[in-house]
Structure formats: structure tokens, C-alpha cells
Amino acid sequence: MLEQFLNKLFADAIAEEELDFLDDNVFQVRVDGIPMAFDLTLKDDRLKLSPVSDRWDLRITGSAYDFMLLAARREDADTLFFQRRITTEGDTELGLYLKNFLDSLDLSDLPFSKLLEQGLQGAISMHDRLEPLGRVLQR
């Protein structure tokens, strides 16, 4: 389901060869705190998701919250990286291609942009309201 969503979301970028830097490269995403991790690559002009493997070219790790902040443009990648809230390992050049691609995106041009924005804002707001409660409960 996520694979289909990403292919629809980035259909124009794929058609315009903006994601060709992922061709034959494996980009691994790991979300801290929840059991979510996957490999992403571009093959035959389609984004392909697969379970994590030992073969990856670039790995990015962060919390779900920080990934949402990044996607919603409430934090920029450099800030999250230098604060070590998002970490990268592997091919630095591939990481720069990915960062530049994400920086160049105009979210309002993406399919489902309003729905995506509302979902991200809602999830971030919910986290912000519940996070203090979580700290109290952890004591």
C-alpha cells in the first residue's frame, strides 16, 4: 500500500527522471521507536519497497515525529541532521541527491497535497498534545 502511494505521489518526478539517482541504489529507512523499516529503490521506473536487507547504499534513521516534521517542512533536514535527530550512513553523494530532491519539492504540486498536509499537521498536533503525558507516565 505504501509503495502504491509513493508511486502516485511521485509519479511526475519519476516520469521527469528526478528520482533516477535511486536507480540500482538502495535507500533504507528506519523509524526509531516503532518496528518500521524498509528498503526503497527505483526499478523499471517504479519505486519498489522491500523488507530491510544488509545491502543498502544509504540508510536514514529517525523518529516518526522527526520524519513528519521534515515532511511537513516544519524542520529542515540540516537542522535535524546537525542535532543528530536524523542520522545517515553510507553514500554521502546519494544522501545529497535525496536532500536536494526533497528540498526542491513544492508540496502544493503533489497529488493529495491537501490531504497529506492535513494528515501530517493532525499527527504532529496529536504528538505535541500527548508527548507531555508520555513523559509523565514514564516517570
Image (cartoon, rainbow, N blue to C red):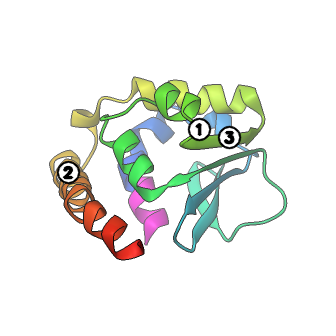
Q: Are marks 3 and 2 in contact (CB under 8 Å)?
A: no
- For badge 2, the amino acid type reads Gln
Q: Amino acid at mark 1?
A: Arg
Give the residue drawn at x 20%, y 51%. Answer: 121
Name the quadrant containing residue 115. Answer: bottom left
Is residue 3 in the magenta section?
Answer: yes
Q: Which residues are magenta?
A: 1-7
Q: Quadrant of the N terminus?
A: bottom left
Magenta residue check for 63: no
Percent from the top left, x then y, of residue 106?
Answer: 30, 29
Q: Residues within 10 Å of mark 1 (few under 14, many from 20)?
A: few
First along the sequence among labels 1 and 2: 1
Residue 10 image point, x, y percent? 42, 45
Label 1 secondary element: loop
| Majority secondary structure in the magenta region | helix
Q: Amino acid at mark 3?
A: Thr
Determine which residue is flagged by label 1: 84
Residue most toward the right? 54
Q: Secondary structure at mark 3?
A: strand
The residue that mark 2 highlights is: 121
Mark 3 and mark 1: span between their CA atoms? 9 Å
Quarter assignment of residue 86: top right
Residue 36 numbered mark, or none: none
In the figure, is residue 100 to the left or right of 50? Answer: left
Q: Residue at x 37, y 30 (%)?
A: 105
